[in-house]
Image (tube, rainbow, N blue to C red):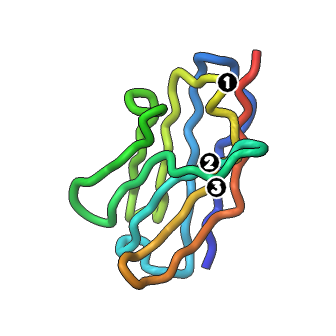
Amino acid sequence: VQLVESGGGLVKPGGSLRLSCTASGFTFSRYRMSWHRQAPGKERELVALIPATGPGTRYVDSVKGRFTISRDNAKRTVYLEMNSLKAEDAAVYFCKADEPPFGATYWGQGTQVTVSS
């Protein structure tokens, strides 16, 4: 099982990035996917979540209207489009797959997002 994130980097405030997370080793379409982030000295927090099927996309309040999560089951990939980035968005972003209520949980290794002028 692997979740491989990509797309992180250095961006100026107000800029945009698109993160990708490509999965292998499990039935991607059955899993709920989410993005989490962890800044230095802070706890990891849920940023956005997309169910395996149907509606129910969720965002943390601080990114609503700026970030969009989406998935392409054919490509086994989940995306996080991040616009109007702020300094406080800087963190390591992790991809997570889980199959509630009792299925497995998988994490990616993380990708660094730095927001600085």
Q: Residue at x 70, y 46 (%)?
A: 42
User: Residue shown at 38%/28% (left/top)?
Assistant: 65
Residue at mark 3 to residue at mark 1: CA–CA distance: 21 Å
For this view, does 61 lie left or right of residue 21?
left
Distance, label 2 to label 3, CA atoms, is 12 Å
| On screen, residue 12 above or below 5 | above
Tell whether 63 sits left or right of 3.
left
CB contact under 8 Å: marks 1 and 2: no
Task: Provide the residue designation for mark 3.
Answer: 5
Q: Amino acid at mark 3?
A: Glu
Disc 2 or disc 3, which is closer to the eye? 2
Compared with 69, 12 (above or below) is above
Residue 90, quarter of the rendered image = top right
Question: Which of pointers 3 and 1 indicates the residue nearer the eye?
Answer: 1
- Viewport quadrant of the N terminus: bottom right
Task: Tell me if mark 1 has few (under 14), some (14-19) or many (20+) residues whose alpha carbon lies within 10 angstroms of its own.
Answer: some
Q: Position of residue 104 (x, y in %)?
A: 49, 82
- SS type, badge 3: strand
Chain-order first, disc 3 or disc 1: 3
Residue picked out by circle 1: 87
Residue highlighted by disc 2: 37
Q: Quadrant of residue 32?
A: bottom left
Q: Nearer the viewer, residue 92 or 46?
A: 46
Looking at the rendered structure, the kind of residue marked 1 is Ala
Reply above or below: 78 against 90: below
> Horizontal and vertical percent for residue 93?
64, 48
| Distance of label 1 from label 2 (alpha carbons) | 13 Å
Q: What SS does tag 1 mark?
A: helix
Q: How many badges with numbers are in the image?
A: 3
Q: Is residue 12 left or right of residue 51?
A: right
Look at label 2 and name its amino acid.
Arg
